Image: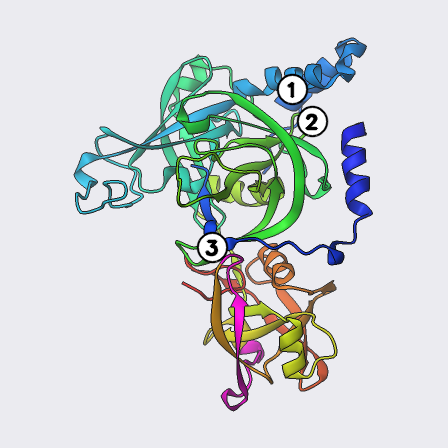
Amino acid sequence: MNSEFRFFSQLYSQIDSKSCVFLILLSSLSISSLSSYPSISSSSVSGTFANALMSTSGNLTSQDTLLSELYNTTVQSVVSITTNVDPRFIDPADNDNGDNRSSLFHGSVDVPLGFGSGFVYDRDGHIVTNYHVLEGGTSADVKFLNGNSYSATLVGKDPLSDLAVLQIDPTALFSEKLVPLELGSSSALNVGQQVVAIGNPVGIFSGTLTEGIVSQLNGIFPDLARGVYNSGLIQIDVPITHGNSGGPLLNLEGRVVGITTLGYNNPNDPTAPIGFINFAIPSNKIARIVPELISNGTYQHAWLGIDVIDVTPYIAKNIGLSEARGSIVYAVSPGSPADIAGISTGNADNRISVLANLFGIVHDKIDINSDADVIIGVDDKQIRQRADLVNYIDSKSVGDTVTLKIIREGIIRNMEATLAKSSANQTSVSTLA
């Protein structure tokens, strides 16, 4: 085990997170998008990197040599992506980008719209990237570090997970020696573990490597534009900025453990570099969704159909709970799995108003009912907060049946719900559009 990783992991495990309170001036922050597994073999990047490790002298114990070897054996599989828009779809009334965000991939191409990163997924020329890198475009170009550039076709997209798949022009299969990056297991990650990102910051500096550590796991973060949650996120302090979006997050074995996707920035200075609170989509989610995008063009997310907030000490006191735990239900979508299962928001005559942290960064006043159901568990998993519920439901499939453990009128009950298919504006839990 890397000594630096061991130090940070041991340090983290000794800290009682309940004793740490972080006060963040959220009004000065906003969210910024950082605009089947591939075969595991010795010819994949990870296998090449492992061979390099075994064949190199003891000097590889130095951090600089390790990162150099990792970079040299993976960077050829990282691409820059330029998204273009057909002038016929440009809307002059759109003051932001000069396009109608139509997400159509056809017609002539003239006007560059945005840029990002991606990586080679397989030898069929599939490139994995972020959905938001391509959103609003009518075509895309993929460029390798050697300067070769190819047109690409959109194969599949999933706005809810912010994942998309391109396929490069078939001529590239003959011109390029495609070396897929190997997916690692994001569930094996630990807080304090060292990771690196390779991408194309600001669309100019191709094949740039930055490094840092895993800061936290299984985070949820809001996509305010769509009113949905990104779930299961890996929080990292790896420096990334616009243009890194869609690029791989790698462990020190050269395997993809995530895709860089978003981070905090200062809305008063949009040109300022992204800070050290950044996020990546976990590789386990990539492994689950990308094969479906390649096969079917879309991915069906499981949906429960409720909105919840964390039970705070104030809420616990007002609804008669002895401790602040679980998530209280304040909305149930009619006809949803939760509605069919009998999950209740309580009686409106028992209404209390609370200041709720609905999206992680936006505080708002909402009404809850003191006799509403409080979810404290699902299947064999304890639910201490909303993130636990969102992440668990998102890991399930359409048609799965889950058992919700709730507190209703002081009594613990078990209620079964069969998860349905979500629409484009529904997360696994939330009904917000």
Q: Amino acid at mark 3?
A: Ser
Where is residue 110? Give x, y as percent: 22, 28
Horizontal and vertical percent position of residue 198: 55, 26
Look at label 1 and name its amino acid.
Leu
The answer to whether residue 350 is magenta is yes
Residue that mark 3 sits on: 27
The N terminus sits in image quarter:
top right
Question: Residue at 51% across / 28% down in the picture?
Answer: 119
SS under mark 1: helix
Which type of secondary structure does the marked residue at label 2 adopt? Answer: loop
- Is residue 261 depicted above or below 243 in this figure? below
| First in residue order: circle 3 vs circle 2 | 3
Which mark is first along the chain, 1 or 3? 3
Question: Which is nearer the N-term, disc 2 or disc 1?
Answer: 1
Locate residue 4: give its quadrant: top right
Inspect this view and state whether residue 42 appears.
no
Q: Which mark is residue 252?
A: 2
Q: Horizontal and vertical percent for residue 55?
A: 76, 10
The image quarter containing residue 380 is bottom right
Q: Is residue 237 above or below residue 60?
A: below
Q: Is residue 173 left or right of residue 4?
A: left
Which of the 4 image quadrants contains residue 10?
Answer: top right
Residue drawn at x 28%, y 46% as measured from the top left: 102
Image position of 188 with respect to 305: above or below: above
Q: Are marks 3 and 1 in contact (CB under 8 Å)?
A: no
CB contact under 8 Å: marks 2 and 1: yes
Tell me the mark number nearer the camera, choosing from 3 and 2.
Answer: 3
According to the picture, the residue beneath numbered tag 1 turns out to be 70
Furthest residue toward bottom: 349
The residue located at (67%, 80%) in the rendering is 317
The range drawn in magenta is 340-361
